[in-house]
Image (spheres, rainbow, N blue to C red):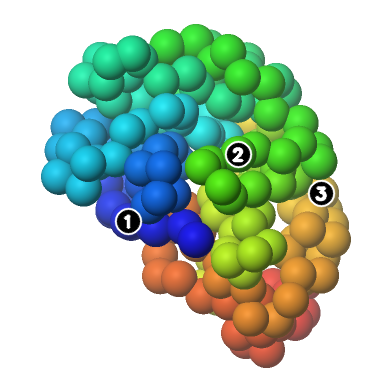
Amino acid sequence: MLAIVPFTLGPVMTNAYLVADPQSREAVVIDPADDGQVIVDEAKRRDWRIVSIWLTHAHFDHLAGTGQVADLVDPPPPVALHPEDYSLWRMQGGAPLFGMRIDPGPEPTIELYDGQSLHLGANHLQVHHAPGHTRGHVIFYCSKEAVVFCGDVIFQGSIGRTDLPGGDYDTLMRTIRTKILNLPDETRLLSGHGPETTVEVEKRTNPFVLYG
């Protein structure tokens, strides 16, 4: 099974997730948005060992806590990112476009790719390339637990913005149709912003899905 601890962190209220296999006590941090100390403290409180950092994409509000997590964990956990977002990572995740500067943390050393299987203890999560919000956006899907960490692809009643560099509305809608809506209806969608939802709810109520 997976144990999932959500956090809402940073200036734009981004969701970060501490995800663990309770048996092995191995954990990963998905999108450490800010305040890595809070995330690491929670892992220590639960006696979990952070072994990696997985980024759905390289926007600053999803990785601003990466450096602090890496500094506080020994050995520093490797960072996973899709290569098509490396250039965005090198630009501090676009933070300068909003008048900010951040430390993006350690350079990613794990290249994510479509169809890749990631292991967390006895759990397997599949990587799906999910472009449209950024070119290298990915989602992490655990079929056994019926849960997908979908970053900024889709939200409760909305979708990721496509007006930033690398965004494309048609590409994002194709991603939503082929990588999200084809999952079982009961699949939980843990998004980068806002509350949890499900595939079934978004099929029925999301205006972008209904009329986009």
Secondary structure under the numbered disc 1 in the rendered image: strand
Residue 89, percent from left and from top: 53, 19
Q: Nearer the viewer, residue 21 or 168?
A: 21
Q: Nearer the viewer, residue 207 or 124?
A: 124
Residue 71 appearing in the image? yes
Quarter where residue 174 is shown: bottom right
Q: Are marks 3 and 2 in contact (CB under 8 Å)?
A: no
Which numbered marker is on residue 119? Answer: 2
Residue at x 36%, y 42% (from the top left corner): 25
Q: Which residue is mark 3?
A: 171
Write down the residue under mark 1. 5
| Amino acid identity at mark 3 | Thr
Q: Quadrant of residue 92?
A: top left
Q: Amino acid at mark 1?
A: Val
On screen, 79 above or below 157? above
Q: Which image quarter is the C terminus in?
A: bottom right
| Cα separation between marks 3 and 2 | 28 Å
Q: Amino acid at mark 2?
A: His
Q: Indicate which disc, 3 or 1, sits on the residue closer to the N terminus.
A: 1
Seen in the image, is 165 located left or right of residue 211?
left
Q: Nearer the viewer, mark 2 or mark 1?
A: 2
Against 175, residue 165 (above or below) is above
Tell us which disc is closer to us: 3 or 2: 2
